[in-house]
Image (tube, helix red, strand yellow):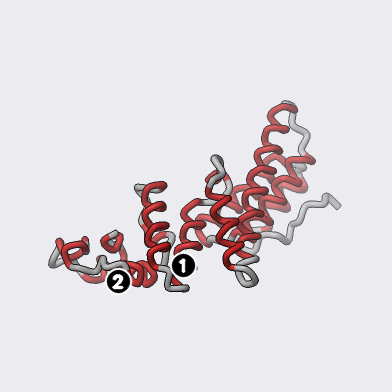
Amino acid sequence: SSGINAEWPLRPGKNIITFYTKGKALESLSGFYDACAQVEIDEYQNYEKALGALSEALKCMNKAKMQDVSTQEAKINFLKRRISLLKKFVQARRSYEEDTEEAMRQCMVLLEETDLDTGVRSGDIYGFMIEHYASTADFQKAYHLVQELKQRLPNASLAYYVNNTVLEQIKRNVGLDEPALDGAADTPGIDEEIEEDIPEDFGF
């Protein structure tokens, strides 16, 4: 047995894995798993599956026989670091049911990691925290985190990370629902469906 898990990816094709494994192209297979991990994060926000994929990528890279040993070691260390970051976020989300404040504390610590976005999207952490504080009616804290998210990712749409309904709820409860503060109010006549698809960041 090669020790490579051909059963891991539910979404990508298994034929690719079998092809790389039989050809002993472990560096390429590592890259494939790495790409799978990124898809799980970007398209599905599924960090558990992404963690599984990166673990497979690391396994492949450890077994690869690259000519440049220093490059291989650098790739191994980079994968280990990203796995470490993913594990911290997965652990924070798992601990949420038992101890919400500890989960929030772990998220805040994680946001201080300078290389966070190599493994975990900071917007996903903020989204997790914002929705928590909104659910506990701590709208000022939620609003503060929305502002932090906007500063950290100025070009990102808030609705990409936080549910639209939650954003509207926060806006209402911190007094941002006046028409003058609502971006959509300045653009009459825009098709309603388009307004839904491209929110105006809800006056934040």
Residue sitting at x 67%, y 36% = 75
The percent position of residue 82, horizontal first and vertical second, equals 63, 45
Instruction: Tell me: residue 64, above or below residue 134.
Output: above
Q: Which quadrant holds residue 176? A: bottom left
Residue for badge 2 = 172
The percent position of residue 192, horizontal first and vertical second, equals 22, 71
Q: Which quadrant holds residue 145? A: bottom left
Q: Which quadrant holds residue 7? A: bottom right
Q: Amino acid at mark 1?
A: Tyr
Which quadrant would the C terminus be assigned to in this image?
bottom left
SS type, badge 1: helix
The percent position of residue 171, horizontal first and vertical second, equals 31, 67
Q: Amino acid at mark 2?
A: Arg
Of marks 1 and 2, which one's residue comes earlier in the chain? 1
Residue for badge 1 = 133
The 10 Å Cα crowd at callout 1, few under 14, some 14 to 19, many 20 or more, is some
Instruction: Tell me: residue 195, above or below residue 106.
Output: below
Left or right: residue 110 versus residue 193 is right
Q: Nearer the viewer, residue 41 or 148?
A: 148
The 10 Å Cα crowd at callout 2, few under 14, some 14 to 19, many 20 or more, is some
Q: Give yes or no for contact between labels 1 and 2 (Cβ–Cβ under 8 Å).
A: no
Instruction: Tell me: residue 130, above or below residue 108.
Output: below
Q: Nearer the viewer, residue 67 or 102?
A: 102
Measure how far apart labels 1 and 2 are at the Cα level.
15 Å
Q: Nearer the viewer, residue 109 or 30?
A: 109
| Residue 56 appears in the rendering | yes
Q: Which mark, by number, is residue 94?
A: none
Residue sitting at x 39%, y 70% = 166
| Residue lying farthest to the right in this orientation | 1
SS type, badge 2: helix
Left or right: residue 195 versus residue 102 is left
The percent position of residue 121, horizontal first and vertical second, equals 51, 51
